[in-house]
Structure formats: C-alpha cells, structure tokens
Image (cartoon, rainbow, N blue to C red):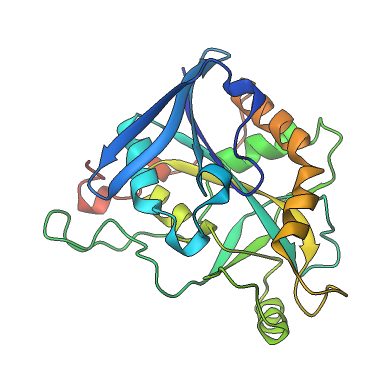
Amino acid sequence: MRKIAIIGGTGIYDADFLEGFESKIIDTPYGQAACKIGELYGNQVVFITRHGVNHSTPPHKVNYRANIWALKSLGVQEIFATTAVGSLNPEMKAGHFVVCDNALDFTKSRINTFYDDDYRGVAHVDVTSPYCPVLRAKVIDILKTMDIPFHPTGTYVCTEGPRFETAAEIKMFAMLGGDLVGMTNIPESILAREAEMCYTTVSIVTNMAAGISPTPLTHSEVVEEMGKSISKMQDLIVEFIKYDGIVDTVCKCNTAMAEVGGFKL
C-alpha cells in the first residue's frame, strides 16, 4: 500500500474522489492541521487544502510546518502538490501543466526548516533537486497518456505574496532562469525533504506574469482560469493514486537527513 498525500492549491479545495473520506484535525508542535483521510485504489490517501476553506489563508501565512509534520505523522511517503502559477516562459501558456524540476526562492518571512530548536539542533538539507525524481517520472509517465498539454521540466520562482510581482521582478526572474512564478512551493518542498518524504508539484499556468500579460493581474482571473483545468487536474490526481508502474530512476528522499540520524517526529 502506497501512502500518498495530495496538497490542493488554489482551485483544488475539494475533489470528487474524496467522498467517504474522514475529516480530521491533527495536533502538531506547530499548530493544528486539517485533513481528510481515506483509501482509494488500495492506497492510503490524505488530502490537505493548502489555503483552507474558501481560500481563507494567504500564502505567506500558510502553516507549512504543521501541514508537513501532520503528513509525516500519518505515515505519508509521497506528496503530490498542485499550484496555480503565472508564466515567464512564452512556451508555457495558460492551461498548460508543468512538472517542475527546480526552484528559486524569493520568500522573505517564512520559517523554512524544522531544524531551528534545541530538540533537533541545526542541520543543512541538500535541495540540489528540490522535487523527487521518482514522483516526477511517475507524473510525466501518466501525462504522456492524457490529453493535457504539459512540460516535463520548469523552474518555479517562489515569491512572498500575497501581492503579485512587479514587471521588473518578473524580468529579473526570467534572466535568472525562472519559468513560472507562484507563492507556495517554498518552504513546502524544503520541509518535505527535511521530513524525508518524496514531494512533487504539478503547476497549472493560469496567466502570463506581470509585464508580460497585457492586462493587470487579478486573483479572480487566476481562479477563473484554474476552473477550466480543475477536472483535468482531478483526473491526473486519480491516475497518480492508481499508478502502479515502475520508473527508471531512484531517489534518496527518505534518507535526506541521514547525516543527523534521520528525521524524527
């Protein structure tokens, strides 16, 4: 049995496949995390809505540590996260899915580690490749069989939010090699690596970024464009949960903190 978590981003607040799942509140050292737990296609599945009910939590105030700690405490091994993003890359158009393979961190105020207290001490996790190559390979394998335009690689630029970016910032991000811009993959992916869980994200392009888009950016535009892709994302999530293929790659996510004796709850 695989133990899978789905972290739903903007627009993915619920899913048809969650019928019959049990709602739970998990107490963690960092606060409470709300989730839904059930079984699907013989696998344990945990669903977390990143922004809460009705998108009530802005990206810079998401309790990332509580969410990831809760998933670890439930035995989760694989995390599939969704994100809505703006595009800096003219090849990555609205409605396209992107299986990100790297990231640039431009957040400012977020706590991005579990290793900052006397209990855990100090540790330095390797995030050369912040997304699990095995989960990425699984997702790419699935997308090849679906009628969804996608890109197998992409660099995700994470900004602090909740404001959108300036045109000058977008120009800089593009010069640095960024393809997409969003507000949530950091510190989520870093914390998942520290907790020794496999993590991948699939981003849905909702708009061209500031200075590229011909019109001012609005959150309603993002939500509206996401609405056109929600059913496809739900189909992808179901296929990911069902997937039983073998991919030709390996990862070391579950031993990421071996240098300090492994991650302990």
Residue drawn at point x = 48 percent, y = 35 percent = 78
Vertical comparison of 207 with 54: above or below: below
Left or right of 49: which side holds 113? left
In which quarter of the view is residue 219 placed? bottom right
Residue 5 spot, x, y in % from top left:
49, 33
Residue 167 visible, this orientation: yes
Vertical comparison of 115 with 38: above or below: below
Residue at the far top in the pictured view: 42
In which quarter of the view is residue 87 placed? bottom right
Q: Is residue 234 or residue 179 the one in the foreground?
A: 234
Q: Is residue 121 or residue 187 the one in the foreground?
A: 187
Residue drawn at point x = 77 percent, y = 56 percent = 206
Residue 12 spot, x, y in % from top left:
63, 40
Left or right of 153: which side holds 72? left
In which quarter of the view is residue 27 placed? top left
Residue 129 visible, this orientation: no
Give the position of the C terminus as an image quadrant.
top left
Residue 25 spot, x, y in % from top left:
34, 33
Residue drawn at point x = 85 percent, y = 74 percent = 215
Residue at the far bottom in the pictured view: 168
Residue 264 spot, x, y in % from top left:
22, 42
Q: Is residue 127 or residue 219 the one in the foreground?
A: 219
